[in-house]
């Protein structure tokens, strides 16, 4: 009998629990689960005999590297600000690596570890979740027949049915706040350009049941990697996210009053915290998980370029609803966890070259798309003549 592959899931929250569940669909995978909260890690690990739980503080690189030395790959489902720390532990442990995103600036820092990873003989994927992740692969898939590429646009929309009352967050509160408040960086006319958060309004009609979304610029890591990955003369790469109007109404006055700021620190009963730290803690204590409604997600990538001397546009589109058999009503969490698992398995199976790379370069698109298909997740590609005259 062949030796099992061993994959470590770092972070026992909503995404990490789905990563572990998908990994267990294979009989030859042993899963380790790490979290700062022992109970959360054990709750996931006990779901399959032989899986192990660990108490992990990601800032303790020495201890983390010791744990990871017993695993083939890690899927990092912790907060993105810890990505570099986890990668450092992986390099020391000679354990391959995938995370779920880095919001542009972190991704750029991670890519600088490419040479060191090659020297250690390990592979690292930066941004291997839903978006970034699936969307990156969709961009490469759309551009694969093009001899030159003019632009790429990534559009993400969603619809919750029924709409919930109160405050719900489809993923980490900290990450949601960052996506709404930090200056996005887009690739415009061949240069990286900072734009204002929630600018660039674009009405997008996705297939039902998602339907119309008003999409805005939001800080993401796709524009950090796709310009160089696709190349071939590309001049523009934009990412836009369908933003909940309710969330905008709630966060706008908080942004204007400085409640999402990292500085200055505020003294509360002898403790020094930032306004943002307070806000995140407050929302974590008051908000729901968004699991009371069904969240359906739409991903669309649009790539313009030249095929056989003619101007063409290629689109890739994915629509995913909840996974009822798994009891998951949030398609954002489902897609992110499943994609993280697939990337992790490809790493552990030795199907990713050594070094650090974004998803669109790390994996063969057809292999990844086939894995999604096994789970009933389909990507539709269309190619047509560009009649816009641009």
Image (cartoon, rainbow, N blue to C red):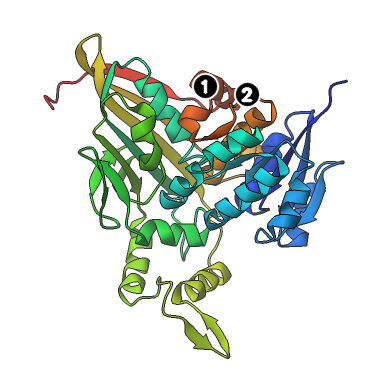
Q: Is residue 84 left or right of residue 102?
A: right
Q: Residue 112 in the image: x percent, y percent? A: 48, 43
- Quadrant location of the N terminus in the rendered image: top right
Left or right of 200 on screen, residue 248: right
**Res 149 quadrant in image:** top left
- Image position, residue 251 (x, y; %): 36, 67
Report the Cα–Cα distance between label 2 and label 1: 9 Å
Left or right placement of residue 190 versus residue 115 in this view: left
| Residue 351 marker | 2
Q: Is residue 208 visible?
A: no
**Mark 1 = which residue?**
364
The quadrant holding residue 147 is top left
* In contact (CB < 8 Å): disc 2 and disc 1: yes
- Outermost bottom residue: 269
Which residue of the protein is positioned furthest toward the left in this rendering? 389
Residue occupying image coordinates x 47% and y 84%: 266
Q: Nearer the viewer, residue 165 or 336?
A: 336
Which residue is at 68% across, 56% downward?
A: 61
Q: Nearer the viewer, residue 1 or 290?
A: 1
* Label 2: few (<14), some (14–19) or many (≥20) C-alpha neighbours in 10 Å: some
Is residue 237 depicted above or below 140 in this figure?
below
- Give the x, y percent position of residue 80: 53, 53
At 57% from the left and 35% from the top, the residue drawn is 339
Q: Secondary structure at mark 2?
A: loop
State the image coordinates of residue 342 (x, y, percent, origin top left): 61, 32
State the quadrant of the C terminus.
Answer: top left
Can residue 306 be spotted in the picture? yes
Tell me what residue is drawn at x 51 percent, y 87 percent.
267
Give SS at disc 1.
Answer: loop
């Amino acid at each position: 009998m062949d030796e099992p592959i061993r994959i470590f899931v770092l972070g026992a929250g909503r995404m990490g629990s789905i990563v572990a569940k998908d990994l267990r669909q294979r009989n030859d995978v042993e899963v380790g689960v790490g979290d700062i909260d022992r109970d959360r890690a054990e709750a996931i690990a006990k779901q399959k005999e032989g899986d192990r739980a660990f108490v992990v503080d990601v800032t303790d690189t020495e201890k983390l590297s010791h744990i990871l030395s017993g695993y083939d790959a890690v899927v990092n489902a912790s907060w993105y600000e810890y990505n570099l720390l986890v990668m450092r532990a992986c390099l020391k442990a000679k354990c391959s690596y995938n995370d779920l995103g880095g919001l542009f600036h972190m991704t750029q820092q991670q890519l600088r570890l490419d040479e060191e990873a090659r020297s250690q003989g390990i592979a690292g994927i930066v941004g291997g979740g839903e978006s970034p992740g699936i969307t990156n692969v969709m961009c490469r898939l759309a551009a694969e027949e093009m001899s030159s590429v003019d632009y790429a646009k990534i559009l993400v929309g969603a619809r919750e049915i029924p709409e919930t009352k109160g405050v719900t967050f489809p993923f980490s509160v900290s990450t949601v706040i960052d996506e709404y408040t930090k200056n996005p960086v887009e690739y415009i006319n061949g240069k990286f350009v900072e734009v204002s958060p929630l600018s660039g309004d674009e009405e997008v009609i996705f297939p039902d049941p998602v339907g119309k979304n008003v999409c805005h610029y939001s800080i993401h890591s796709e524009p950090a990697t796709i310009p160089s990955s696709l190349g071939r003369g590309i001049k523009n790469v934009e990412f836009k996210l369908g933003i909940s109007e309710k969330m905008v109404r709630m966060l706008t006055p908080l942004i204007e009053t400085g409640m999402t700021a990292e500085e200055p620190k505020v003294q509360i009963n002898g403790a020094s915290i930032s306004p943002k730290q307070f806000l995140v803690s407050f929302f974590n204590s008051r908000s729901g998980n968004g699991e009371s409604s069904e969240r359906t997600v739409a991903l669309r990538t649009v790539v313009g370029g030249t095929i056989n001397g003619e101007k063409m546009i290629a689109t890739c589109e994915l629509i995913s609803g909840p996974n009822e058999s798994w009891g998951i009503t949030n398609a954002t969490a489902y897609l992110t966890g499943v994609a993280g698992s697939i990337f992790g398995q490809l790493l552990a199976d030795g199907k990713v070259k050594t070094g650090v790379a974004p998803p669109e370069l790390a994996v063969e698109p057809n292999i990844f798309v086939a894995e999604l298909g096994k789970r009933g997740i389909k990507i539709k590609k269309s190619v047509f003549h560009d009649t816009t005259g641009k």
